[in-house]
Amino acid sequence: MKDMLLLLISSSIVSNIVLSQFMGLCPFLGVSRKIKTAGGMGTAVIFVITLASAVAGVIYKFILQPLHIEYLETIVFILVIAALVQFVEMFLKKAMPSLYQALGVYLPLITTNCAVLGVAITNVQKEYGILTGIVNGFATALGFTIAIVILAGLREKMEYNEVPESFKGMPMVLLTAGLMAIAFCGFSGLI
C-alpha cells in the first residue's frame, strides 16, 4: 500500500507528465483557456489513460507476451487508446454537448497524445503489474489534470492584466508554463 501511495505522488506531482516529462503539451496549451474546459479535458484524459493502462496491461501480459509478439505493443496500444477515445467522444457528444463543443479538435487528439501512449509503454518498460500500471496511469492523468487546471486558472487571471504587446497570447502562456515546470522540478529535488 505504501508503494502505491508513493507511486501516486511520484507520477502525479514529482514526475508530472506535462511539466517534468513534457508530454501532452498540445492539449495542455490548447485547452487551458478556461478552467471548466481544462477540467473536462482532464477528466477525459483520466478516464482514457486509466482504462488504457488497464486494457494495455492485460493485452500485453495475456496476449502479446505469451505469443512473443511484444514488438506490436505500440500498434496495439494505439488501437486500444483510439477505441477508448471514441467511447469518450460518443459519451460527451450525447451527455455533455457543450463540453464536447468546447474541447473541439483536442478531444480526438487524445488518441495521438504522446502522454497516453507514453504511460502504456512506461508501464510495460518498468514491468508494472496490471494493478500497479492502473495506479500509475491514474496518477499520471491526475498530474496532467492538475497541471492543465492550474494553467487555465493562471490564464484566466492573465486576461485582465496589462501585458507588453510582444508577450500577449502564446508567448505569455509559454512563459507561464515554463515557470510552472521550474516550480514542479522543485518537487524532484533537482533545484
Image (cartoon, rainbow, N blue to C red):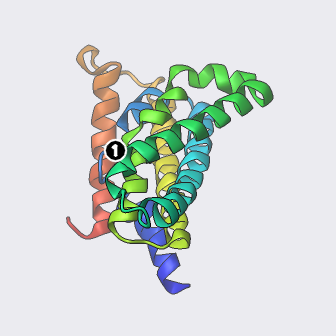
Q: Number of marks in the image?
A: 1
Looking at the rendering, in which quadrant would you find the N terminus? bottom right
Residue closer to the observer: 34 or 118: 118
**Residue marked by disc 1:** 23
Report the side of 109 relative to 38 (left or right): left
Residue lying at 36% horizontally and 37% vertically, measured from the top left: 25
Q: Position of residue 100 (x, y in %)?
A: 66, 24
Please report the residue visible at 47 percent of the width from the left and 29 percent of the height from the top.
Answer: 109
Res 104 → quadrant: top right
| Residue at 47% in and 23% down | 159
Q: Is residue 175 visible?
A: yes
The furthest residue to the bottom: 2
Query: Considering only vertical position in the picture, is 170 above or below 133?
Result: above
Q: Residue at left 47%, top 48%?
A: 144
Where is residue 11 shown, x and y percent of the image? Answer: 42, 64
Which residue is most to the left?
191
- Please name whichever residue, 81 or 94, is drawn nearer the observer in this view of the structure: 81
Residue 116, given in percent of the width and then of the height, sits at 44, 46
Name the image quarter holding the C terminus: bottom left
Task: Look at the picture and state if 44 lies above or below 55.
Answer: above
Q: Amino acid at mark 1?
A: Met
Residue found at the very far front of the displayed protein? 67
Task: Note whether residue 17 is visible.
Answer: no
Q: Residues within 10 Å of mark 1 (few under 14, many from 20)?
A: some
Q: In the figure, is residue 92 to the left or right of 48?
A: right
Q: Position of residue 62 (x, y in %)?
A: 52, 65
Label 1 residue SS: loop
